[in-house]
Each structure stands twice: as C-alpha cells, then as structure tokens.
C-alpha cells in the first residue's frame, strides 16, 4: 500500500537534546511538508521541500532543521534551540502539479521532559 | 494575504442531526478548496475537495460547494453519526504559491447518541 509513514508514534526526550523525526513516503511525490500542531490549534508549516536537495522555511522554522537527500525521505530535527518543542508533528506530501492536495502521515507526538 | 476562516467549535450535535460547518476564504486567484478530517491522535485525511467555482465535493455523506460569489465552502451532512466526531479543517491551495496549503484553525465536532 502506498502512503506516508512517520516514526515513532510517541517520542520522549530530555530538554536540551536534539531529536530527529522520521518521515517516509512511497507515493512518488515530489513535495513534502512538516507541520506542527499544538493542542486545540490548527497546523503551522515548519519546512517544505519541492524537490530533492532543496527545501524552504515555512512560518515557524526557527529551532528546526531538515534534509532532503532522497525523494522518499524528509526527516525533521528538533534542535535544542526550539523553545517549546512539545507538540504533535505531522508530515505530508503532494504531487508537484495540479491541486496540491496533500496526503498526511499519522503524526509523531513529541514530549520534551 | 490568502486566508481561511472557520466557525469556532466545538459543534455539539445529537446523532442524526444536520451538520453545517462554515468556511470562508480570501484569495487573490482561483484556489482549490479542501476539507480534511482529523480523528483523535491521528493525521489528517482528505474528506473532499473542489477545484473550481460551483463544483461540489462529496464523500461519506459530506458535501461542500465551491461558492465564488460568497467565497465560501461550507461543509454539510444530512445526518451525523457518533463516528463523525472529529476535528474538521478547511483549506485552500495558495494560488500565489502552489506548494502550500493554507489551513483554517479547525472545528471540533462532537456527536452524542
């Protein structure tokens, strides 16, 4: 089955540690996205990538970093510079034409202790 | 700039009641419009979409019509079920930057038996 996988589902880290969230897709989509969702809130765009080896900052990129070395993979690193990293993180992908409909992964809930 | 405005929730209904969740948008061009649904602890799933004025998107008993004259895309269902309880997000593709979706803040629906 084609889709987007995010791992792990739940992640716990100590304050001051960097942590990397995984996102893999086998939909052959060119574009990939990372969003942050806080309780009771909407989605905020962190980073997005239209093509391998290229990515752009979204609305809240500070304290985060990404890479796009392969079309299928778009890992997100939450660095120690992110002041309030505890949140639900969603990865999405879309085909690079048409309506830009996005397909979402199941999300990773990060808790920083 | 482009934006999406949704009615605030929660919307609380009894089973078999009629549902309307309002969504209006501001866009400079001709966006595509989407409704996504998010069940607790999960990612977003596309519920329906419409790509041009007067299009009606429909899925699982839900409908929404792209109204350019009122810049609206209201979500409706004739008879809700307990299993419809979720958060619903209205979104548009940004015609100035087709790599992004712009999301509303989400509306929580609670359906009681």
Image: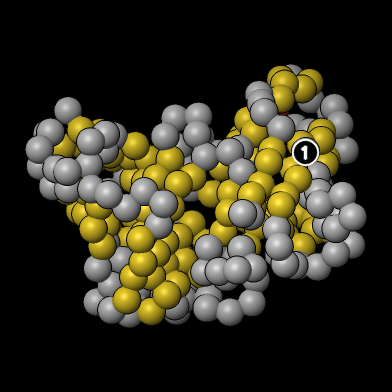
Q: Residue at x 53, y 63 (%)?
A: B100
Q: Residue at x 37, y 53 (%)?
A: A46
Q: From the viewer's side, name the closer residue of B17 and B99.
A: B99
Residue B75's spot in the image, x, y percent? 78, 44
Q: From the viewer's side, name the closer residue of B79 and A56.
A: A56
Q: Residue at x 71, y 32 (%)?
A: B7
Q: From the viewer's side, name the closer residue of A23 and A44.
A: A44
Check the picture and name the quadrant holding the C terminus of chain A.
top left
Tell me which chain the residue with mark 1 is part of.
Answer: B
Residue B49's spot in the image, x, y percent? 72, 60
Residue B77's spot in the image, x, y percent? 83, 40
Question: Considering the numbered disc 1 on the image, is that residue within a helix, a strand or a loop?
Answer: loop
Please give left or right for residue A28 compared with residue B56 in the image: left
Residue denoted by label 1: B22
User: How many marks overall?
Assistant: 1
> Taking A82 as reference, is B92 above or below it?
below
């Amino acid at each position: 089955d084609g889709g987007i996988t995010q791992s792990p589902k739940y992640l716990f880290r100590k304050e001051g540690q960097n942590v990397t969230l995984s996102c893999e897709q086998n939909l052959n989509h060119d574009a990939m996205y990372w969003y942050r969702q806080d309780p009771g809130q909407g989605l905020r765009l962190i980073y997005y990538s239209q093509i391998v080896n290229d990515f752009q900052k979204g609305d809240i990129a500070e304290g985060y970093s990404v890479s796009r070395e392969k079309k299928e993979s778009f890992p997100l690193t939450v660095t120690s510079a992110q002041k309030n990293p505890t949140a639900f993180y969603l990865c999405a992908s879309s085909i690079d034409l048409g309506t830009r409909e996005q397909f979402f992964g199941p999300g990773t809930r990060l808790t920083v202790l | 700039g482009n934006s999406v405005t949704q009615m605030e929730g929660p919307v609380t209904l009894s089973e078999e009641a009629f549902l309307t969740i309002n969504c209006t948008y501001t866009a400079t061009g001709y966006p595509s419009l989407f409704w996504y649904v998010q069940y607790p602890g999960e990612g977003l799933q596309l519920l329906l979409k419409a790509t041009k004025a007067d299009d009606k998107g429909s899925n699982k008993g839900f409908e929404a019509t792209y109204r350019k004259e009122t810049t609206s895309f209201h979500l409706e269902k004739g008879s809700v079920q307990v299993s419809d309880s979720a958060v619903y997000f209205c979104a548009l593709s940004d015609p100035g930057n087709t790599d992004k979706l712009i999301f509303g803040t989400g509306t929580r629906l609670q359906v009681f038996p």
